[in-house]
Image: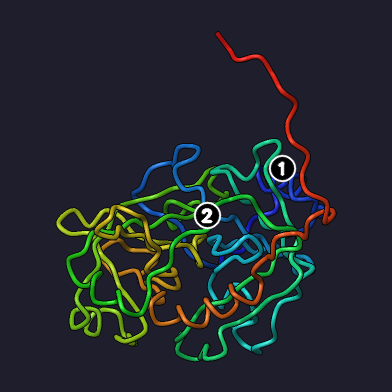
Amino acid sequence: MRRLASRGKLAVVLAVLSCAALSVPEALAVVGGAPAQEGTFPSLAYVVDVQGRYVYQCTGTVVAPSLILTAGHCAEDMRSGVVNKASGYRVVTGTVDPMMPGAAVSTVLGVIVYPWFVRRVDDGDAALLVLSTPTEAPPIALARRSEARSFSGGSPAVVAGWGIASFEQKLPTEALRFAGTVVQARKWCTGNARPFYAKREICTIAPPSYATGACSGDSGGPLLAQRPTGEPVQIGIAVHVYGRCSTRRPSVFVSVASISSWVSTWIAAYKVSPPPPASSAPPALPAATSPTP
C-alpha cells in the first residue's frame, strides 16, 4: 500500500473520487514497464482508502460484479490488525486512468480479510472489498488449485498496477502500467525472497535484463499469465518487494491458487440472482413488419 502526496494530480484524483481535500501518507507499482492502453486490462481496479488525514493507494482486480480482490495489508492495519473502515474506500473500475471524466467510481460496503493472513510474516496477504454498486467491468479468471503447477518456474507473466515507476518518484503515476516478468522456481524463491512460503506464494524476476518489477503503488495488483487456451488468468496478488524496489531482487505475490476456494466461496455468496419477471403474463408478440429488401 502506498501513501500518496497531497498535491498535484492527487488533488484531481480526490476530486474525481468525491473525497475531501486532505493531507495525505507504502504498497507496490510497476518499474521498467509501459503505460497500458485503454481497454487492455479491463478487470483492474484502482483503490484509494481515506484514513483521517491520509490517503492510501492500492490496486485490485474485479473477481465478481460486487467484489474486488486486493492485498490484505490494503485492508487492515499491519500493526494492530484492525480492519479498515469500509466508508473510507473509493474504487475506480473500467479504465486505465482513474482521473478520466466519467470513470466508474464506487464506494465500499464491506472489507473481508483472508482469515489466515499472518501480518508478522506477511503470509496469506489477501482481502476482498465489497462494492456498494456492482461494476460492469468483467471479472478476471482466477487460477485454480489444480493449476498451481501449470505456472511454475520459467513461466512468462505480466505484472500490472498503478503507482510509482521508480523508488524516487514523488507523485502518483497517471495511468496503469504493466511489465513482463518470469515466475521463478520455488527453490530459487526460498533462497532469494526470504521468508518465502512455497505452497502459498510466487516470486518473479526478469532475467537477463533485470529491468522490471513491482514497487510502491501496486500492492494488491495482479500477476497475470495465460492458460493453454490463451485466456488470461490471475495467478498472484502483489504483496512485497526488496531493496527499494530493486529490479534485481524478486517481487513476491500471494498465490491465487492457494486462496481460490476462499475467494470462490465469497463470489458464490455475492452472486447476483436474475430479477424475477415483471408479471406471469406471456410476453407480447412483436408487431409484424415488412421484410427488408
Q: Would you identify the image quadrant in which residue 146 lies? A: bottom left
- The quadrant of the rendering that contains the C terminus is top right
Q: Which residue is mark 2?
A: 44
- Local crowd size for mark 2, using a 10 Å CA cut-off: few (<14), some (14–19), many (≥20): many
- Tags 2 and 1 in contact by the CB under 8 Å rule? no
| Disc 2 residue type (three-letter) | Leu
Label 2 to label 1: alpha-carbon separation: 20 Å
From what the image shows, is residue 8 above or below residue 81? above
Q: What is the x, y in percent for residue 252?
A: 36, 73
From what the image shows, is residue 130 above or below residue 45? below
Residue at the spot x=34%, y=54% of the render? 231
Viewer-closest of 217 and 268: 268
| Disc 1 residue type (three-letter) | Val
Residue at the spot x=19%, y=79% of the render? 188
Residue at the spot x=69%, y=47% of the render? 104
Q: Secondary structure at mark 1?
A: helix
> Residue at the left extreme?
208
Q: Label for residue 12?
A: 1
- Single out the mark in the foreground, 2 or 1: 2
Please state if 270 lies on the left or on the right of 213 as rendered. Answer: right
Please state if 36 lies on the left or on the right of 182 as rendered. Answer: right
- The quadrant of the rendering that contains the N terminus is bottom right
Q: What is the x, y in percent for residue 230?
A: 29, 52
Viewer-closest of 104 and 46: 104
Q: What is the x, y in percent for residue 25?
A: 66, 65
Q: Earlier in the sequence, mark 2 or mark 1?
A: 1
Viewer-closest of 124 and 8: 124
